[in-house]
Amino acid sequence: MSNALLEVESPRLPPQPETPESWRRFFTFSTDHKVIGIQYIVTAFVFFLFGGILAMVMRGELITPEADLVDHTVYNGLFTMHGTIMLFMWTFPMLNGLANYLVPLMIGARDMAFPRLNAVAFWMVPVFGVILIASFFVPGGPSQSGWWAYPPVSLQNPTGNLINGQSLWLLAVALSGVSSIMGAVNIVTTIFRMRAPGMGWFKMPAFCWTVLSAQLIQLIGLPALTAGAVMLLLDLTVGTSFFEPSRGGDPVLYQHFFWFYSHPAVYVIILPIFGVFSEVFPVYSRKPLFGYKVVVVSSLLITTFSLIVWVHHMFASGTPGWMRMLFMFTTMAISIPTGIKVFAWVATVWGGKLRLTTAMLFALGGLFSFLFAGITGIMLASTPFDIHVNNTYFVVGHFHYVINGAVVMGFYAAIYHWFPKMTGRMYYEGLGKLHFALTFIGINLIFLPMHPLGLMGMPRRVASYDPEFAFWNVIASLGGFLLGVSTLPFLLNMLSSWSRGEAAGDNPWRAIGLEWLISSPPPHENFEEIPIVISPPYGYGSDEPLVSNNPAGAVNP
Amino acid sequence: MNTENTRTRDLNRVLNRRRIINLTGLAAVNLLISLWMGQQAYRWLPPQASAESVLVDKLFSFMTAVGCFIFIGVVGTLLYSMVFHRAAKYDTSDGPPIEGNVKLEIVWTAVPIILIIWIGTVSFNTYDQMSILGAIAPVTMKTVPTVPLDRKKEVLANPNPTDTSPPIEVNSRQWAWEFYYPDEGISSTELHLPVNQRARFKLTSEDVLHGFYIPAFRVKQDIIPGRAIDFSFTPIREGRYRLRDSEFSGTYFAANQTNVVVESEAAFQQWLTTAAASPAEPAENAASKEFTAAQNSGRFRWKTVKPAPAPTVNYTSSEKDSYE
């Protein structure tokens, strides 16, 4: 916060090459939330590409029924690390990046509540990322027990070494939990304590509501996962018997620890993306967010429900009947607040003045995927049907429609929407649309065939399969390779636009929001003058000003 | 003034009526497509080879129809907007500042609630019927005695003689299935069941979690080491089906599958007799074969848990045997 004092005393100077405004700041222990946000997003995206390459090798293996491309041990390592990297190294850091960058700007704050904690939380990401990647090179290879690390398989340790893929995996996951808890404390505090004057709860943008709802889940759920990981690590390394049945432990107990967090984690991931949809649809439809209050309160309802649905992952795991029925109903109930949101977005778009920019296309594509995944999700909640498709490709298809369909497309929507704000430059619309087309086709081509495969009874996590599954697997593999190719126009677009794109101006989309009232990219302290908010967040179609002062100050009249 | 008001009112009424007719028409078309999709749903599933599968498929067909109706409704609306509600190139004006509509919001909160209660009830009833059939395993924490403690009582309660015999013991390990018929003292790597009789099992694992899954029967149950799990279902269609491990169990998980043969009572008895007369021999084991092949190939691999010795059984089928 000492920077803040300095800034107030000295007049604002234009950025100079020697100042921390140069590109080098992205490689420093910066405490600027915008720098940290971009650090998170770029780091996470690098891991996304790495996890994607692992997935493409898996799809290469699965293009034929036999295990002929890689050995079984290698395949098992690939899907374990794919899942782990995509969740702990890509989605969580990526969403923390978006929240870091956007929340202080949207609520009219100059930074996060705890800037140093923020930087520490970020710099843990490369640390546990390196630990995870290093596990490829220890004897015995990386963890091969799936990203759930269910004991007893995860405790088998064929090499007998203390340092093995599984123990490094557990260490990385525990560190990731600590980092995420730090992030959650920071974000929740920021939203509670640092909103600009006049920004009551119901004047706060929907994105901040969803981030708050998601981070509350992190605070409640992560300790369970972290504790479970530590107990499993003790079982593995010093021979305790929490979960090892041959020593009197209970492997099902681990499943409760794991899913108590890891199902709500899905909502940690999807909620901020709901927030992105709620921000993007109004801007490109030129209409207020339909039913704003209901939409934002639904986020908190989802948070509450998300904590009481975890057993639906364990319907086939030796779960008593009463538990199956109870969790079937709670799981179905969570679709009500989610359904309300979907209908509200449709009503927001309806009758608007639509502009199908890349961001809007990605948001619509994400909504489409989410709707499909939501419907298969209700099917999966239904216990008798779940028993048939549990642990089959139906589930794999379902959650990839959520994670890759809704979340990754929602992420792209956010990046295209806020790229001008983050960099001060415009991206190339044509390349963006090409990127959208390839992504959308790729996602449906790879993940739709997984549903018939699961219905036919193809288990997940297999390196080889019976020949009747070959047809849909070939299509899925082709879709997977297309999805890999689809990142190329994105990378090209981002890199070239960031260095030589057209200047964007403060508010190229004519969007309403505090972040659009200041220059692009925003100055170090964001707001020259802390904004005084006087209107609700989505005033499209009405002429009420959002703030009663000029937050950009004299520099940007 | 008055006449003009009346005229506008009439015009609005006509427009409203037309809109309602249009919407009803579209909903009817959607309903027809959804019902058709619900019927198609049966074709995406394996053959219905157990009493349970009939129930599950009906439930899936119902959920497919409901899901389709919602999906087409929402996506149709979005696509309509994307085509007809586009801003003209130089139109920078805003859309109508509609911030919400309480009536509409109540409707779309109520509709999902009703749908959820409906789907939940149908699912619950299906579950209930499956429990009566026995496909829902009441999981016991303790080891189940192989011979029922009070057989006499059970015979009185249930005149069906097959229910009094001890259950078939399903023994899973890394990576093989072994089925033991205690009355006859026969072991096999292929599961044989008489058609139209309730098959009862005791599921155990020697090492890690495994999943007992027969897609054609729509039944699945995780097997937990250290516990014995009671399980049962009723095959209703003769044929050969696949039995797969459904809970990831380590390196050769994918190879851990075998066949289930559902046959007439006579054929089943014949099989029991043949099997009882055969000496116990080590069975073929796909995981061991793959393990040996991997050891001999120069392909990169990491160290793995060794497959357990192949089960020694009276009857074994070839991996290449056909199935549906």
Image (cartoon, rainbow, N blue to C red):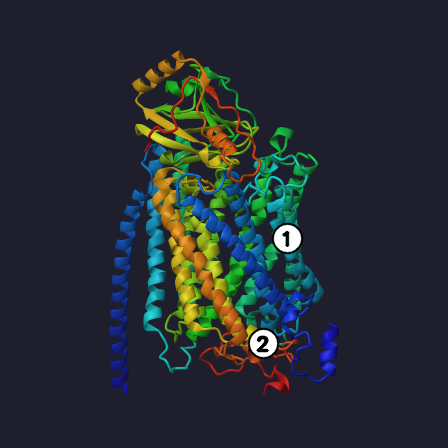
Which quadrant of the figure contains the C terminus of chain A? bottom right
Q: Quadrant of residue A457?
A: top left
Report x, y in % for residue A503. Answer: 52, 80
Q: Residue furthest top?
A: B277
Name the residue tied to disc 2.
Answer: A521
Could you say where residue B44 lies in the image, as x and y percent from the top left? 32, 44
- Picture layout, residue A418 above or below residue A54: below
- Look at the picture and state if A5 lies above or below B242: below
Which amino acid is tagged 1? Val
Q: Determine the residue located farthest toward the front in the rendered image.
A: B298
Q: Position of residue B289 (x, y in %)?
A: 46, 29
Judging depth in this view, the residue of A322 and A18 nearest the camera is: A18
In the rendering, at what x and y percent does residue A244 appear? 62, 33
- Count of marks, rendered view: 2
Give me the residue at 75% from left, 73% from top. Answer: A2
Residue shown at the point (43%, 15%) measured from the top left? B183
Residue designated by label 1: A130
The chain to which mark 1 is attached is A
* Residue A332 placement, left or right of B240: right
